[in-house]
Image (cartoon, grey):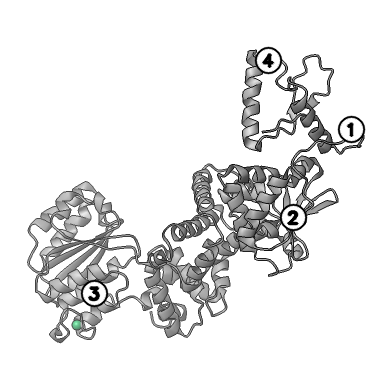
Amino acid sequence: MTGNDALTSQERYVSLYRRYRPLRFDEVVGQDAAVSVLRHSLEGGKTVHAYLFSGPRGCGKTSLARILSKALNCTDARTGAEPCGACPSCVAITAGESLDVVEIDGASNRGIDEVRELKAHVSLAPFSSRRKIYIVDEVHMLTEPAFNALLKTLEEPPSHAVFILATTEPQKVPVTIRSRCQHIPFRRIPGKDIALRLSRVCEKEGIPSEEAALWELARQADGAMRDALSLLEQAIPVGSGSVTAESVRTLVGGGSRAEMESFVALFRSKPEEAIATLMESLQKGASMERLVESLFLIFRDLWILKTWGAKTLESLELSSEEKAFLLEESSLWKLEGLRFSLENLSRMMGRLRLGIRTDILAGLLLQGLRTGQPAGGLPLETSSSPKAMASTASGGETASVSEKATAIVPSGSLDQAAIRQFWIHLLESQDTADRQVAAALSGAVVREGEGEMIVDFAGKDRICFELIRLERNLKRFTTCKEESLGAVPVTFCCMGECLRSGEGTALPDPVPVGENSNPAPWERRKKRTHQIEKEDPSFPVAQEGEGSPEGERQTTALDEMIGWFGGEVLLVRQEDPEGTASGFEEGSASE
Ligand SMILES: [Zn+2]
């Protein structure tokens, strides 16, 4: 190879993975149980002739097999179970030049001929060491005749031979083979161990790195240190010599944890902007699978945190920044909302495999997340109607114009959390009187004025405005409000007409109205109520078919409505078989 410059430079370049491969037991990351078993057997002189190392790819099986090989052949006894790394045997094995350690790839040497050859080789004495060690990788790939030949060897191994069989799928290794081996299961390396290892490697290499970036790489590697180091290697040039969240994002093509965290927070507070960023990510080529997986994990973590509290954070594999995000974000979500989001995302995962167009998937994703949206802004922030708030309180939809509302709300002048609590209490109350108030407020929009709360009714909700003005409803509302909010003034408005609570301008409960007045619609209604009560025994609704089945049905429905509205029927639609009447009749009954 001398004189070949290209090859020489190739030889000089050693990948991070190979450079940082563990050479001693105490350098192995994330496989404490396996290491401990092997150390103990070495220390106690109880090594066996065959080991089966099983575990996910890239988790260190081959590296540990080499360390075990060195330990078995090390000529320096002073270091105990740990190979010395300096004796000729250790040096040769580390360099991959030992004639007594044979590595075989089971995937490419899977036939009976190869195994027969191996068998012949095994019978020969070691070249320069105590033991001859065969490391067979991907052993589950061997053919059945090859397994049978291997089994013969394992049944009567020469005393100098040691087999280390490695596999990602131990269940595919015949039980006859497995039963001849000491089975050592390896685990997927925990993300925190990988992240820590990556940060050590960066330190040693003098490469600046961001914690979140290393965590993202660790997550991408999914328990495989080999993959993590190779990703790190790729991320360094992308970040021009440093490992940043941005370079990792570029490398993995969008959908990183950090990116999706911002998406979740943005979607909660400013959905319009969140949608734009999602579309941009997809445009840039982020895969929908990755976006959905990242989102699912974030919602899973939020849900776990919300359900079982902060102590669960320790069992989640997250950087300190990510933990801080979860703590803050989870306080802004309702448990139900998180559950809905998780359900919708898991449904999305099934759809991802159906080959649906990305833009359609994006639509489904947004729709699914919207269903699970949190009790987003406060009522003031969102200008949301109490009805919308009621549904968010139980995990339903929420109004989403927080941006606009944030502009309206002078920050800190009112205690918004208390105001929200007050609304939720009112809307969820089982008390009949509260329910009447809640029903009256169901169409209103709440916003903040100059140090006061304004409850706005649209023109079509005039009737609700009237309802809340009724003395007892207003009184009830005021009592509730004072219990939760104290003296915060409240003004009810409808089409320019305003009523300030507690200023004695409430409408009295229905009273007769003079004959000559020009009454407002509700006054006309009150007048009629009064007349019906006093003079007309045949109440307009019940008069049709009194005693007839229709009449009974109508009365039952009416009773129910009266139950709900506390004795007032404000609008009753009457059937009009001839089609002559307007179809509406205002009527009222009192308690
Ligand atoms: Zn040694």
The residues tagged by marks 3 and 4 sit, at their Cα atoms, a distance apart of 96 Å
Q: Position of residue 348 (x, y in %)?
A: 53, 46
According to the picture, the residue beneath numbered tag 1 turns out to be 515
According to the picture, the residue beneath numbered tag 3 turns out to be 67
Of the residues shown, which amino acid type is indicated by label 1? Glu
Of the residues shown, which amino acid type is indicated by label 4? Glu
Identify which residue is drawn at 91% across, 37% down. 517
- Judging depth in this view, the residue of 306 and 41 nearest the camera is 306
According to the picture, the residue beneath numbered tag 2 turns out to be 501
In the image, ligand 1 is in what quadrant?
bottom left
Mark 2: C-beta under 8 Å from nearest atom of ligand 1? no
The residues tagged by marks 2 and 3 sit, at their Cα atoms, a distance apart of 81 Å
- Judging depth in this view, the residue of 307 and 123 nearest the camera is 307
Identify which residue is drawn at 15% across, 82% down. 80
- Mark 2 vs mark 3: give the one in front: 2
- Judging depth in this view, the residue of 69 and 144 nearest the camera is 69
Left or right: 507 as drawn, with respect to 249: right
According to the picture, the residue beneath numbered tag 4 turns out to be 546
